Image (spheres, rainbow, N blue to C red):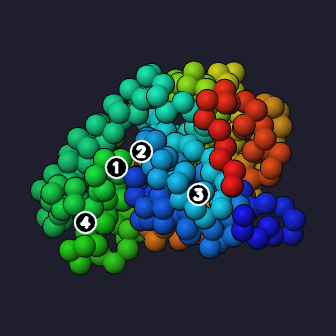
Amino acid sequence: MSTVRGGAPVIDLHAHSTVSDGTETPSQLLASASAAGVNVLAITDHDTVGGWDEAAAAAAEHGVGLVRGIEVSCTWRYASVHLLGYLTDPHDPDLTAALARARESRATRLQRMVDKMAADGIPVTYDEVLAQVAPGATPGRPHIADALIASGVIAHRDEAFREWLTDDSPYYVGHWSPDPIQAVELVRAAGGSPVVAHPFTRTRSGGLTDDLLERMAEAGLVGLEAFHRDHGPEEIARATALADRLGLVVTGSSDYHGSGKLNRLGENTTTPEALAVIEARSSGVTQVLRP
Ligand code: AMP
Ligand code: ZN
Ligand code: FE
Ligand code: FE
């Protein structure tokens, strides 16, 4: 295991690979985690468990602990909600079916977004976008940005998001996704521990309401990701107070996307106590891998 800073292990419970919209393969991601001094990393690709096996082999090779997870895209009253699901059974039929449906709908939706952009003179084709998606990976808006980078239109993903890709852009098209309460139930039924990702990210809709989070807690939610770069002191305080009131743990993570975002591995972390609750509340079908 890599160096433990100040005696406490560095636990980072949210990171993406090329199996969704990160820029590093699962193997490269675990190598980066090791180099960054992360002791336990969660791989949480959008709507897929496709990176788990490669990540597990690389975690063993690099001496990094691994929490296998997913980040489920959900929709609530036209707002997007992201739910982390840790340690689910990768063969659970209902969760597997929901994730497959979301991935298919994501592909159709990207094609429609690209068509709208092209019709408006933005030089991008769906084939160019598909060339940016690894085989079998979950396609997302960052791959449209990558196609525009590949053809020299922009230099960084962030420019594409600022110009064309936000939720309130005229080119935005949604995709099928479960509602957040359904998603909590799906993750629970698959033996996993659900945690709301960056609950108070500032969005057009103002983020999640306490009322929805209460209902998710009743459905079996385990935690709130309080420590995330999208949260300032106010959002962290709100998440911590709400977690206390609802009996949830708080977690922290980098939400690393390789070179696709500024987020650095280990920039926010989770306590061993919170990870222990996440483990204890899961069925044990999928275990935390420790070196
Ligand atoms: P989608 O999954 O297609 O809805 O796209 C959302 C993804 O885009 C999220 O996972 C974010 O990580 C990524 N994203 C959002 N804003 C930006 C940005 N400004 N720069 C790079 N990536 C972004
Ligand atoms: Zn992402
Ligand atoms: Fe997210
Ligand atoms: Fe994420």
Q: What residue type is labelled 3?
A: Ala
Q: Mark 3 points at which residue?
A: 59
Q: Is residue 234 left or right of residue 202?
A: right
How far, Cα to Cα, is label 4 from label 2? Answer: 22 Å
Q: Are marks 2 and 1 in contact (CB under 8 Å)?
A: yes
Per the image, label 4 sits on a secondary structure element best described as: helix
Gap in Å between the C-alphas at discs 2 and 1?
Answer: 7 Å
Q: Name the residue type under label 4.
A: Ala
Give the mark toward the camera: 3 or 4.
3
* Residue 70 screen position, x and y as percent: 52, 42
Is the C terminus in the top left, top right, bottom left or bottom right quadrant? bottom right
Q: In this view, does 283 lie to the left or right of 56?
A: right
- Nearest to N terminus: mark 3 or mark 1: 3
Between disc 2 and disc 3, the foreground one is: 3
- Amino acid type at mark 1: Ala
Q: Is mark 4 within 8 Å of ligand 1?
A: no
The image shows residue 172, relative to residue 17, as above or below, that is above
Residue type for callout 2: Gly
Quadrant containing the N terminus in the rendered view: bottom right
Q: Label 4, on which residue?
A: 147
Point 18% across, 62% down: residue: 128
Name the secondary structure under disc 2. loop
* Helix, strand or loop at mark 1: loop
| Residue where numbered disc 1 is placed | 137
Mark before the other along the chain sequence, 2 or 1 = 2
Mark 2 to mark 3 CA distance (whole Å): 15 Å
- Please tell me which residue is depicted at 48% across the width and 47% down the height of the picture: 53
Q: Residue 8: horizontal and vertical position, in percent?
A: 84, 61
Using the image, tell me which numbered label, if any, was put on residue 50: 2
Rendered position, 197 above or below 182: below
- Residue drawn at (23%, 78%), measured in percent from left and top? 152
Residue 214 has which mark? none
